[in-house]
């Protein structure tokens, strides 16, 4: 028999070394006669193949929930969809977080969409404003005063709300004279 460390030297007491793990030696080999005969501890699969992968919560699912709580609308919606597919594929936890992110993202996207529509409608409605108010009777009196009807200017002044543009326009007889006095009494 040859020594596995040195192929030219036969085994002997000079190269016995420590006994193998668990105290078991080759059958009939008395070199390990004094070694412990306690049974070897069973090997755990993690010590042979490495640590098993951790099955924690999916990071994208957490990110979907956090961005949903921050109000980032499309971001949690996208992250939640990707995380939900990944959770289903890998078996990791986090499906509920992904669904929460999807719901928050969808609600926020819808709310931001409604807000945008309202802002656009409001901008369009206010862009057609001619500078007059929103009272059709006062607007008619304004137009008549502007056309030169001094009685309409006096009537506009009398019916207009206090300190309004209608009142100022009627009091100045359609921006023809300084404020004060009736327009019918003036020679315009």
Image (cartoon, rainbow, N blue to C red):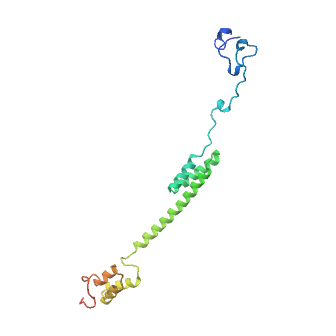
- Quarter of the image holding residue 26? top right
Residue at 56%, 48% (x, y): give it. 60
Question: Residue 145: x, y in percent?
Answer: 32, 85
Name of the residue lying farthest toward the bottom? 185
Q: Nearer the viewer, residue 87 or 15?
A: 15
Task: Using the image, determine if residue 5 lies above or below residue 145.
Answer: above
Task: Using the image, determine if residue 18 lies above or below residue 62.
Answer: above
Task: Using the image, determine if residue 41 lies above or below residue 75.
Answer: above
Name of the residue lying farthest toward the right? 28
Count of picture labels: 0
Q: Quadrant of the C terminus?
A: bottom left
Q: Nearer the viewer, residue 188 or 21?
A: 21
In the visual, does 55 lie left or right of 147? right
In the visual, does 45 lie left or right of 154? right
Question: Residue 42: x, y in percent?
Answer: 70, 28
Question: Residue 180: x, y in percent?
Answer: 26, 84
Q: Quadrant of the N terminus?
A: top right
Question: Residue 112: x, y in percent?
Answer: 50, 62
- Quarter of the image holding residue 22? top right
Residue at 53%, 62% (x, y): give it. 110
In the visual, does 55 lie left or right of 37? left
Task: Using the image, determine if residue 51 lies above or below residue 92.
Answer: above
């Amino acid at each position: 028999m040859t020594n596995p460390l040195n192929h030219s030297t036969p085994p002997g007491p000079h190269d016995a070394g420590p006994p193998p793990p668990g105290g078991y030696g080759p059958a009939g080999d008395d070199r390990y006669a004094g070694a412990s005969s306690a049974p070897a501890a069973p090997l755990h699969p993690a010590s042979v193949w490495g640590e098993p992968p951790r099955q924690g919560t999916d990071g994208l699912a957490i990110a979907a929930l956090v961005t949903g709580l921050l109000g980032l609308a499309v971001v949690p919606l996208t992250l939640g969809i990707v995380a939900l597919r990944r959770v289903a594929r890998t078996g990791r936890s986090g499906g509920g977080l992904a669904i929460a992110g999807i719901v928050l993202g969808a609600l926020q996207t819808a709310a931001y969409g409604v807000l945008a529509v309202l802002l656009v409608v409001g901008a369009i409605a206010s862009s057609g404003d001619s500078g007059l108010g929103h009272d059709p009777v006062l607007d008619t009196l304004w137009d008549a005063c502007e056309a030169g009807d001094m009685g309409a200017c006096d009537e506009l002044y009398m019916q207009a709300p206090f300190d309004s543009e209608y009142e100022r326009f009627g009091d100045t007889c359609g921006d023809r004279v300084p404020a004060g006095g009736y327009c019918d009494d003036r020679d315009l």
